[in-house]
Image (tube, grey):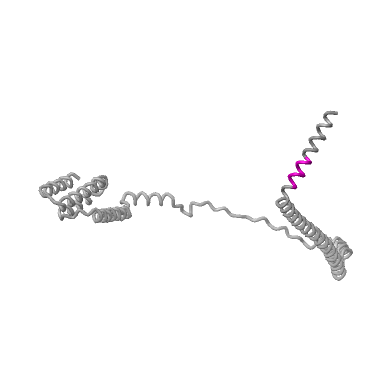
Amino acid sequence: MERLKSILADKVLDLSSGSGEEVKAKIEKIQRFRDFANALKSFMIKYPAIEDELISMVEDGDFDTKVASSRVDTIIRLADTERAQAAKVTPQIVEPTGVEDQSLLDETEDSYINPDDIPMEIYEGEEEALVQTEDVDFEEIESISEDVVKGYVPFEDVKAEEHVDIEESSESEEDDSLDISEEEKAAKRKQTIRRVLQIVGIILAVIALIFIIKFIMTHWQTVLIVLGIVVALGILIFWLKRKR
């Protein structure tokens, strides 16, 4: 920043020796350029290339702040992209040394289990008890078979009974559904009638209000007179009752 300031001061001194409108305009441009550079002081510390670019512009006699602003933006953008690319570089993988390899091998050898060292257990299953034909009592088998025959029901009878039960249950369900549907229809009818009556009542009330408002607007004088008479009579009656 100090180099840029000294170069700008030299330019101002060179121009101050002359006179005329062009010299004044150029000095004003240099002052604006100097103010612009002062505003970028913090950026120059972070991006040193900005100061070099501005010095090159001053040496070329270009004091346009718009051009300087665009060049500064370009420098900042390029510097940010370079930093981002440098941050994205992946670190190199460090290969393990021979000592680490040896330690890994030792650990694997320690964890290795020899199958011969595993104790073997011989499984002896329970012997199934063989039933001899001599131990079976045929009289018990005959009695069990007779009981089964007594409790046997033919398949046709079971099927017929189930069919009758299913028909009866389906008929009862249909009757219940019909009753429910009729009740729902009656409730819906009542609800619709109520809504219609409510709507008709609201419409009639609105019409009556419209007529009352129209009557009051056209005959407001008579309405006021009648109200005044009613109020006066009410006050008189109240006063007489109180007096009595």
Res. 124 image quadrant: bottom right
Relative to residue 150, is residue 223 drawn left or right?
left
**How would you classify the magenta stretch by its main secondary structure?**
helix
Q: Find the residue positioned furthest to the right.
A: 150
- Residue farthest to the bottom? 156
- 122 on left or right of 159: left
Of the 4 image quadrants, the one containing the N terminus is top left
Magenta stretch: give its range.
222-230
Which residue occupies 70% across, 51% down?
A: 217
| Residue 8 locus on image (x, y percent) | 16, 47
In the picture, measured across the screen, residue 54 lies left or right of residue 153, that is: left
Give whichever of 28, 229 is nearer the camera. 229
Q: Nearer the viewer, residue 191 or 195?
A: 195
| Residue situated in front as seen by the camera: 106 or 114 | 106
Return the x and y of residue 23 as percentages of the image width and height.
15, 51
Residue 239 lies in quadrant:
top right
The answer to whether residue 93 is visible is no
**Depicted 54 relative to depicted 189: above or below:** above
Indicate the position of residue 191 as horizontal and vertical percent values.
78, 58
Q: Per the image, is 228 magenta?
A: yes
Q: Which residue appears farthest toward the top when viewing the image?
A: 243
Observer able to see residue 42: yes
Is 90 a magenta residue? no
Instruction: Residue 59 in the image: state x and y as whole percent.
Output: 15, 53
Query: Which quadrant is home to the C terminus?
Result: top right
The answer to whether residue 14 is left or right of residue 208 is left
